[in-house]
Image (cartoon, grey):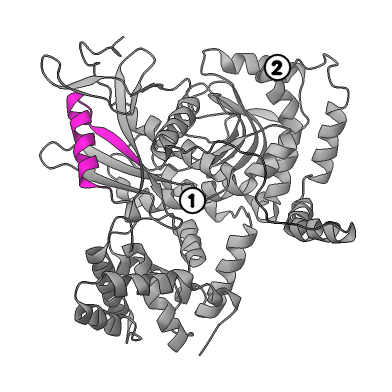
Amino acid sequence: MGAKFPLRLRWNRGTEIINQINKLSPEPVVAVTVLLDVLTTPVDLDDATRKIQLLATHLESIRVGSHPSASRAPFVASYYWGLDAPTDWPVAWPKSTEYLEYCTGVSTYDDQGDRYAELYRYAMELDGDPLRFEQVTDWWADQRPIVMDPALCDRAALREAADKVTDDPERYRGNARALVAVAQHIGTSLEARISGATGRTLKAHKPSLTWDGVWPRGDLWVDWRVPGTYGLAVRLWLNGRGLAIGLRPYPNGNAGGTERVRALVESHPLPGYELLASGGSRIGKDVGFIGGGSGEAVYARWFGRDALSSLDLPKEVLKTAAAVAPLIAVLAGDTNIGDGADELASIVAEFKASTGYPTAGNEQDQATRRDYAPALGLARLVLTNLTLTDVRGSTTALSFMVDMNDLFQRFVTERLRRELQGRLDLIGEPTVHLGQGQQVAMQPDLVFRAPRGVIRYVGDIKYKLAPDARGRSSDYYQLLAYTTAMDLTEGVLIYCSDSGDTHQSVVTVKHSGKRLVLHSIDLSGTPAQVEHEIATLADAIAASSIGGGTSYVAGDPMAP
């Protein structure tokens, strides 16, 4: 018994949950009974799932606000089981569950017992050694390795062969989840390095789960997109035949974009690159893509399925990013190729393409310097015979307070407006009316409409935590009123989330069928990760608003 490896020492969350049970349970006898049952090592998997759901139910019954969250039940229970029988029961560490989500694409479970059962089956069937499984997931979460296996082509081919007349879309949903999960992992893991290779800020975007709102997708793509553009990005795109890595060349969605790009690349070609057609394009080589925008193409290098096993994906993507950087600059309106504005640009691009700069080693060197910066600063003070003092100074200054509700709302609003530019117009806090004759005025935080003025979607922002993606009843009532007043089938509540919590849930209203979506944003990550979450939310809103248009609300100031 004891620590399996250093990760076992990180136990503050588990003790916090036990303390909360002790403090918040109104009936101590009930709490003790639950803990004695739950923390005793189970006899089999059915017993384990029962115990975890028992603990989750108790946590939910004593919850005050956001804590304690029922989603902590698998970790708390399995930690004790792992101490007693480490070779029999894998612990649901956050990094282990994150790895499971990456492999399966499933992040939401109605039953916390089922959530642990999936982790158990995966750990035991994949390796059979829970300790080694935990070490692998710990390594994976820290290193973020990126591989491109031909099995992903098989997943794409499975969906491409679907018969929409006789097949059930649900058969392909798990497959699509896995493809989207891999896309998200690749996108966030390479975002900073690709931005460095192109010399500009790019934001990772992943695809939605479905192609048309019903049928799950059968391809995998990642865009590292220039912020504020329709689709100007470094693009990775996989189908059943292979993989394209290149440039998605669309700064806006205006007609004729593909023809203009064809003229540009014909006058300034890149060796090994060619225009590859999307599913709805007559321009470019057909390599089997089904999805993609109508009439679009990518300017890319093509790698057949057989080449993927030996492909160094990060190196090839970084090489492409450096190579297409001058074209991105031209399409973004920054410069003209051959204008002589930057004599070093071609040399820098060649250096990045040949060396793969910035490499993981460069990033580690920078991280190491940051880690030692505080110690080095104190050492310099000692060597120069200086010291630190903690005394009251002579300068006075005004203090101030920040309204976090307003700040969060403004942040989300502006970021969504930027991400949806060219796709949807976002109107902040317009006045709409619940009753006829302009009775009962309301102001939803977000209203989304098509460029021609038709309202498509509505949302409200809450600076609150949503454990297990469950919102407050009053917030759902509010969103239901908005969707009813504007005759919309769906709306979204935007919450904050704690690290590791479920990010999305849907409540379908009885009789009306309206869908009340809750989407939470994890603000604890890096700025790039937060931006990625906003971009993912924007894509989900854009996808959900397609085909769901309604007329504007007559008499409201926001009406066109």
| 33 w.r.t. 307: above or below | below
Vertically, is 306 above or below 547?
below
* Residue 291 vertical position relative to residue 24 in the rendered view, above or below: above
* Amino acid of disc 1: Ala
Count residues near mark 2 (Cα–Cα under 10 Å), then give few for <14, some for 14-19, many for 20+.
Answer: some
Quadrant of residue 449 in the image? top left
Which sits earlier in the primary sequence, circle 2 or circle 1? Answer: 1
Count every numbered label the image shows and give the total.
Answer: 2
In the image, the segment drawn in magenta is: 471-494
Q: Secondary structure at mark 1?
A: helix
- Between marks 2 and 1 in the image, the one whose residue lies nearer the viewer: 1
Residue found at the far front of this picture: 394
Using the numbered discs, state the Cα–Cα distance from disc 2 to disc 1 in whole angstroms: 34 Å
Residue holding disc 1? 181
Q: Which quarter of the figure is the C terminus placed in?
A: top left
Instruction: Where is residue 116? Give x, y as percent.
Output: 37, 70
Q: Relative to 389, is 206 on the left or the right?
A: left
Amino acid at dot 2: Leu
Q: Which residue shows up at 28% across the image and 12% down it?
A: 557
Observer-nearest residue: 211 or 481? 481
Q: Nearer the viewer, residue 299 or 146?
A: 146
Q: Is residue 45 magenta?
A: no
Task: Indicate left or right for 259 with 330 as reference.
Answer: left
Task: In this rendered view, identify the residue nearer to me: 401 or 442.
Answer: 401
Residue at the disc numbered 2: 264
Q: Position of residue 327 (x, y in %)?
A: 71, 24
The answer to whether residue 197 is left or right of residue 293 is right
Point 29% across, 85% down: residue: 36
Judged from the image, the secondary structure of the residue bearing numbered disc 2 is: helix
The percent coordinates of residue 317 (x first, y second) are 69, 42
